[in-house]
Image: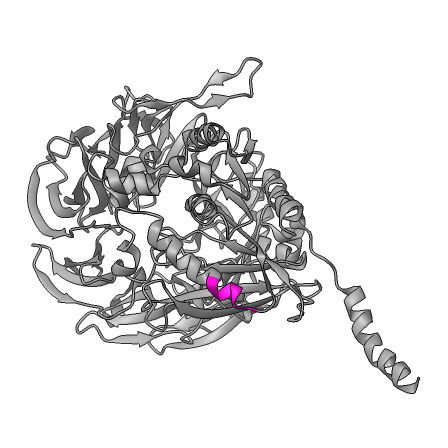
Amino acid sequence: MKKIILTLILLCPLMAQAQTLKQPTLDDLLWDGQGYADLVPKKLNTAFWGNSLMKRTAEDISFLRDAKGRTDRRGTAFTRSDVQAALGTDTLSLKSLEKAGFPDPDQPLALINADKARLLYNWQTRQLVWQQPLPQGNVQANQFCYASRTHAFVRDWNIYLTLPDGTEHQLTFDGSRQLVYGQSVHRNEWGIDRGLFWSPDGQKLAFYRMDQSMVADFPLVDIDHRIAQAAPVKYPMAGEASHKVTVGVYDQQTRRTVYLQAGDPTDRYFTNLTWSPDGSLIYLIELPRSQDSYQLVSYDARTGERLKVLYTESNPKYVHPTHALSFLPWDPSRFILQSERDGFNHLYLFNADGQEVRQLTEGRFVVTDLVGFCPARKSVIVVSTESGDMRHNIYEVRVSDGRRTLLDNGVGYHTPTLSPSGEWLVDNWSSPKVFRQYDLVQTAKASASKLRTDGNPWAGYVMPTVNHGRLKAADDTTTLYWRTVLPPDFDAVKKYPAVVYVYGGPGLRNVDESWNYAARPWEYYMANRGYIVFVLDNRGSKDRGFAFESCTFRHLGQEEMADQMKGVAYLRSLSYIDSERIGVHGWSFGGFMTTSLMLNYPDTFKVGVAGGPVIDWKYYEVMYGERYMDTPQQNPEGYASSSLLNKAGNLKGRLQIIVGYNDDTCILQHSLAFLRACQDAGTQPDYFVYPGQEHNMRGKDQIHLHERITRYFDDYLK
């Protein structure tokens, strides 16, 4: 009896602690949840003013560190009320200062957007120096240039300029859904994220012009009307007609537009547009539709004349240039080109004539980002995986000889913001045990001082345990990385259902050395409900080099599935995994993988939820699909082996497909064709649609979506 009483006494504090911890809901965990913002620490929002560091909030801007990295005790620079007072009785409203910029390192000026105007505010005189109206109406793209204080934008498919005095000037007049000006082209591939490009001095504007009149419409429907209306989208499918792109250049001084003389744009891609430092030249990387080679070409920005091919690169599989040129600030006759030609993305130094000077970085690691330059030290700041496959760390690279210096702690996942001079950077980083920390780093000394550390946001909640490890891929050579999310009350004696979460495609990975190994909120939620969640980055995913990614070339899904099944074999080897209750879930490429695994291994996976899945690659877009699969005409065997339509009869377990009704990335033809194939084969998938949503669910539908996914596993796997 005494032993029992003693045991109860010892357990009481633990029981009391368990009772005080909360069980997080999807509203707490998910990014669009109502409770998420209240629980996760607010990010430290900073921006450099020259070498001084400023802190930005919605209500005020304050001095954080001075130009020598010391704590700046001057306090608040100005408040939102100060700026509003400077506006006087103006009808403009200023809601937040969180995006204020400091464009002049020598002047106390803040560039701020109010609801209808752009403002330049002097915080020492407490006066507005300048203001410019923001465009109204159906604005589809924006690009402001501080050098000329001119704002280029696209309204109703045409390009306009708002001049420094606030007057509007229209540049194009024939824009339409068929003829698109100034917007991102080639479906945002090759790093393209905009269609307006100012020269350094702001006197010339380069822009994309995309003729997509020859591209087939895919029928979408807008149901937000008394009678639903057609809302078609131009969608160039693999093997079908693609759009034609040209590049125009408008000169503010002559008010003339010329087009680059690149030749026939049919079945060609133009990307990585770069201005020369003096604004006289434009550089383009040009690819044929086959994507097995590219040329770096220079053009005269005044006449549009094609001048010279500076560099060429080819690969029997594909090339994938995603970065514009980076000219050296201290030597405008030299630039850095990023290339995967030795198997890993690295930096190469060229002179302006296209002669290679040297390879700046080299090794079995990937440069993931060129952050900027430090002219005083004649160095470039990069992020790379040199310290480890799962890590992103910051290095300084000396341009004279390529010598690299680590600027951070050598672990974790780091995202730097560089000062204009390159002498300081803010390092926003996390590691498996550090949710988020901000350091101020002096690049010359590679020394850091802590600005702030954010603790575990879920400290008051019942949360699972996250582990990680490695295993060999299906080739028995390549190392792959995984994580598991275990229930908070995990007991190795029990048997647990397991859910494999998968993406698996190029351009993304799921496991890295950030907080909890990059575990997603839904994984926490599922583990809290008694599941074990397993995530493995198979061959074909990003940041492991070209060979790792391209082994899936022309047969998407095959090597990826083989690696995922090695992960499942590892799961099944664990005594606490119920091998009869294994599920799988993924979105987009992960939806393709989920459906593929359910159909190719029907006796392994009991339940699957596939979101926005690719079903047959011949229905996917030209640029992405043909890079990894060639065309259906060139690779009929590969398309046939990866298609899930002819495997619909293999379905044994419960499979739910979820799509956005207005998805213009992975169009409805995929899922609808699969439903038809299942009906013909006599199999019974489930199907759910989100009207009005596109490829990913936003807002409150994000909560609804994850509740639906969870319920499906609860109903059929748990």
Please tell me which residue lies in front, 536 or 322.
Answer: 536
Q: Which residues are magenta?
A: 569-574
Is residue 280 positioned above or below 343 on the image? Answer: above
Tell me, yes or no, whether the highlighted magenta stretch contains residue 572.
Answer: yes
Q: How many marks?
A: 0
Query: In the figure, 82 relative to 23: above or below?
Result: above
Q: Position of residue 286 (x, y in %)?
A: 17, 42
Question: Residue at position x 58%, y 14% from top?
Answer: 226
- In the displayed structure image, the side of residue 406 where residue 529 appears, left or right: right
Q: Position of residue 111 (x, y in %)?
A: 44, 47
Q: Quadrant of residue 32?
A: top right
| Quarter assignment of residue 362 | bottom left
Secondary structure mostly seen in the magenta stretch: helix
Q: Tell me if residue 115 can be seen.
A: no
Q: Is residue 256 above or below residue 407?
A: above
Image quarter in which the N terminus is found: bottom right
Quadrant hosting residue 637: top left
Q: Is residue 317 depicted above or below 244 in this figure?
A: below
582 relative to 179 in the view: left or right: right
Q: Is residue 281 left or right of residue 387?
A: left
- The residue lying furthest to the top in this view is 227
Q: In the current view of this chain or complex, which residue is farthest to the bottom?
A: 2
At 30% from the left and 38% from the top, the residue drawn is 640
Q: Nearer the viewer, residue 530 or 212?
A: 530
The percent coordinates of residue 678 (x first, y second) are: 47, 32
Viewer-side residue, 493 vs 153 = 493
Query: Is there any visible trace of residue 444 in the rendered image?
Result: yes
Q: Residue at x 34, y 29 (%)?
A: 235
Colour pattern: one colour
Residue 351 belongs to the span the image colors magenta = no
User: In this view, which residue lies farthest toward the right?
Assistant: 1
